[in-house]
Image: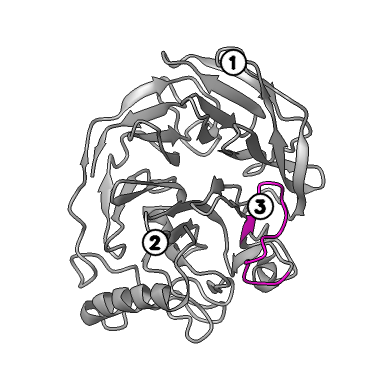
Amino acid sequence: MEPMRGAAARGIRFALTVLVAGSVAGALIGCSAAAPPEPAAPTATDGGPAPAPAPAVGEPVDLATGLAAPWSVAFLADGTPLVSERDTGRILELSETGEAREVGVIAGIRTDSEAGLLGLAVDEGDRLYVYSTGAAGNRIQRFVLRGDPGGLALGSPETILDGIPAASFHDGGRLAFGPDGMLYATTGDAGDRPASQDLGSLAGKILRMTPGGDVPADNPFDGSLVYSYGHRNVQGIAWADEGTMFASEFGQDTWDELNVIEPGGNYGWPDVEGTGGGDGFIDPVQQWNPDEASPSGMARVGDTLYLANLRGQVLRAVPVADPTQHEDLFAGEYGRLRDAVAAPDGSLWVLTNNTDGRGSPRDGDDRVLRIEVDG
C-alpha cells in the first residue's frame, strides 16, 4: 500500500494541530537558528495534550543478555532474529533460548562514537540489508545468507548505495521495508546542517529505493532517492495499517520530534527545530525536550507506536489514532533504549544500549527484552 499522500496527510496534520492549539494557544513554538530557546514543551499540567491511556503491556522478559551495544534487530521469514552490534561489527543470530551466535563480521567499518554497524532489514527473499559506516562514508550493503538457522553465514557483500555523508555523530542508520515493498533508509546531517536542505545531498534525509538501490519511478523528486528532507537525525520509522508513515527524530537542544512523513516534505532542519516553521515546512505532530526522550528506534504494534528512548530511558507509547498523545513506560528501569521492533509473534522487542560508553551498565547488559502487547 502506498504511504498516505497530499491532502489526506495534510488533513490529519491539520486536525492534530487544531486539537493541540485549542489548549496550548501558541505554546508549541519551535526555535530557529536565530531565535532564543523557547520554554519547555507543554505537559498535561500546563495545558498540553493529556497523557494517552497506557496500553496493556506485560513485564519485559530477558531474551538475550551480554550483548555489546546492540543497534538493530531484523527477522528472517522463519522468525530467526538477527542483531547488529555497533562497535564490534558483528551480526548475531539468536537461538530460541537466547544464545547469541556470530553469523559474520561486517568488514571495513569505522567505529567512532555514533558511527559503526547500524541498521538491518530483511527482504522477502531473506537477503540481509546492512547500514554501516565505512572509510568513504555510510553505505548500504546486501548479503545472501548461507546455511540454516544455528549455522548461518554471510555471503559476499553487494553495495547497493554508498557515499552517504558520515561523521562521528548524526549518521541516521535505520533501514526498513515499507508496505509498498520499497527500502527506506534514514540519514543524519553528519554535522553539516545546511546539507539537510540540499536536495543534492543524501544527508539529513529519508531515502526510498528499490531493493536493488535504484530510484523508484514514483519518488517525489525525479531521479532522486530523496523521499523527505530537512531532518537532523531520524532513527525511527514505522507505518500504520493504511500506509501513514511516522518518523522519530533527535532534536538539538530544544525539541525531539514525531513526524507524519509526506513524500517530498520538508521538515525544517536546520531552519527550524520543532513546530512553528511556517510556510514550506511541515510541523511535527508531537515534540519533547531531548532530556525527556532522545528517540531512536520505533515500531508499530497493534494500534500503538512504541519509541525507544536513550536519554529519557523510557519506552514511549503513542496511539496511532491520536499521535499528539503519549504515555511513558518503564521509566529508568532498563536504562537507555536503542530499538523497538515488532516481532513475528505480535510481541514487542526492545534493545537496551548501556554499554556504548554513554550509559550505566546493569548486570547482564546489554540485553534484548520481549514485551507482550495487547492493543
Q: Is residue 199 magenta?
A: no
Numbered disc in front, either 2 or 1: 1
Mark 2 touches mark 1? (CB < 8 Å): no
> Mark 3 and mark 1: span between their CA atoms?
27 Å
Residue type at mark 3: give it.
Thr
Across and down, in percent, residue 270 comes to 59, 72
N-terminal of the pair, mark 3 or mark 1, is 1
Residue 97 quadrant: top left
Q: What residue is disc 3 on?
A: 210
Residue at point 57%, 65% (across, down): 231
Q: What residue is disc 1 on?
A: 148
N-terminal of the pair, mark 3 or mark 2, is 3
Q: Nearer the viewer, residue 190 or 368?
A: 368
Tell me if residue 16 comes above or below residue 250 in the rendering: below
Q: Nearer the viewer, residue 290 or 197?
A: 197
- Give SS at disc 3: loop
Q: What residue is disc 2 on?
A: 289
Residue at point 49%, 61% (across, down): 2
Across and down, in percent, residue 39 comes to 35, 73
> Mark 2 and mark 1: span between their CA atoms?
45 Å
Residue type at mark 2: give it.
Asn
For mark 3, does the 10 Å Cα neighbourhood hold few (<14), some (14 to 19), or many (20 or more) residues?
some
Residue at the limit of the structure toward the right, as seen here: 136
- Segment tinted magenta in the rendering: 206-222
Tell me if residue 103 comes above or below residue 196 in the rendering: above
